[in-house]
Image (tube, helix red, strand yellow):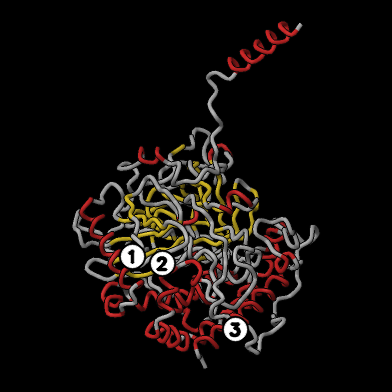
Amino acid sequence: MKRIISVLAAAVMLITMLGGCGKKPAQDNDSEQTSNSQDENSQTIQNQEEGESSGDNKNTAKDNQSDGSNSQTAGKADSSDKTQDSGKVTSDNNTQNGDGNGNNGDGTHTGDGAPSDNYAPPVTNTDDPGDIDPDEIGHLESDGEIDTRYEGKNDNLPYIDKASTTVSDFEITADSYDEKKLTLPIMKIVTGNGKDITSKTEYTGATVSISNTLKNYSLGNTVVDIRGRGNSTWQFFDKKAYKLKFTVKTDLFGMGAAKKWVLLANALDESMMRNYLAFNLGKALGLEFTSDCQFLNLYINGQYKGVYLLCEQVQEGSNRVNINTSPVGQVDTGYLLEGINNASPVDYKTFKLNDVNGKSLGKGAFTFIIKSPDIIQCTEEQKNFISDYVAKANEAIFNKDWDGIQKYIDVDSFVNMFLLDEILLNQDMGYSFYLYKKQGGKLFMGPAWDFDQACGSSSHGGSGYKGWYAGSELQWFTTLIEMPQFKELVSKRYQEKKTAIRGMLNTIDSTVNKYSFDFAMSNYVFNTFGDPNRWRTMYEIASCKTYKDHIIYLKTWLTNRFIWMENQLGVK
């Protein structure tokens, strides 16, 4: 009997093995883009689209943010003057013509914005070399500790328990749900054959249109590719983030012509205000190349997806990060770098820094990605030049050599970025950040990016508003804030921009009140208020049962953060 059982068991095992032959493992769409993107190189020269040569520097304060008012691009939708024009969008002397009735500039007719029956959605590899987004790269998240060396234990400062707000308790119900009452611009995306967007590594062909806005910002049906994007947002939230890629450079909402755009979902941030505030404040502080942004309502294949924040892709270009990278091969050219904690990108030229006197940049192994010039154009001589330059800056900082620091870095940009990250207590500051160097110039910090885990929104760092968070993550800032020369500049800059900094409180109320119906509609679709099981939520956030609760929490947190920082920096 035992022999019969053994024979049967062996037969079952053999059948199982044979049945699995030839099967391919299912593709993991949530796999991290950089560490699993070998086949991105197949796109290389054909899709090498950064012909965005240097031109005039981008106006980083064109929306007059210095007074802290909500005059950012999101305020450009004026309901008193909403008309759709022919949808003509000028893109570097290339004109896309759409008449809003499905007649595209390429001669095709797509009915009500849907691709024609013979339109086959292209499937492409994820992105061109040099264009991976910062929050899509595989990384080891930090534990979010806050440096308490400077934290006052019993400082007796006038902290508040609850901020005031003019935001109402208005909420959408099933009876009041009405998409016809939306006031923000409306972006409609229709994919080929109605295909769902399920991958953040492959683009899907689609058309896009923009309406419900000023005539100059309307866009007729235009061909575009779309894919998912992000790391935690893509994995843990129903409200997904997306990336758009046009066939020609296209100007959206007056932000400058470019091919690539980002739709931030703000899924973790239930106030939907943190990234918006960060971009506004970055401009007010004078951080060069800070992204413009625009709130809008998003539809995909006819389904309402809620309020999104349209932003610029961080990339080299005349309307983006305007650094001169020509002529090709020149050693002291423009460079765009990204520092990533514990990542192993495969489609970039990279370098790492040696420890200085036992000090390293962060808790993990920081890798610097050379995003521009990209992997195709970047020579070994260029890689050696920029890695050596950053190494010298690193040595100067950790040796507290003020003369060397001033020689290799643009101190003002480090001061401004330090303030932006610290005022908002950005929990991602030690995981990813950008640097750039203009041709023949110094090393700059920026552009700013990724602030949804800020202002006490995440268990990754907690709800506290005291302490220098940069001290536990980004060791450059730890060292610099200990130097009296740097701290004096930080204090002076805060004092100069105090009106704009504190003006964020008014910006919150005015922006939310202006678009209260839209925010309420979005919250109705993705209502997660009070859910204790959301990714990285915590008691203080889960206790917010309404949108107004989230606004009060955010304003309370910011007010107390201002009080603590102003005391630390001696700001009057």
Q: Residue at x 65, y 49 (%)?
A: 303
Horizontal and vertical percent for residue 172? 75, 63
Q: Is residue 465 left or right of residue 449?
A: right
Give the mark nearer the N terminus: 1 vs 3: 3
Where does label 1 land, which residue? Answer: 436
Q: Secondary structure at mark 3?
A: loop
Q: Quadrant of the N terminus?
A: top right
Q: Are marks 2 and 3 in contact (CB under 8 Å)?
A: no
Q: Label 2: few (<14), some or many (≥20) within 10 Å? A: many
Q: Secondary structure under badge 1?
A: strand
- Whether label 1 touches label 2, CB < 8 Å: yes
Q: Which residue is mark 3?
A: 152
Q: Nearer the viewer, residue 129 or 63?
A: 129
Say few, some or many: other residues with alpha carbon within 10 Å of mark 3 (under 14 / 14 to 19 / 20 or more).
some
The three-letter code of the residue at mark 2 reads: Pro
Query: Could you say which disc has been placed on residue 568 in the image?
Result: none
449, 340: nearer the viewer: 340
**Which of pointers 2 and 3 lies earlier in the amino acid sequence?**
3
Measured in 3D between alpha carbons, the distance from the residue under mark 2 to the one under mark 3, in whole angstroms, is 31 Å
Q: Is residue 352 above or below residue 26?
A: below
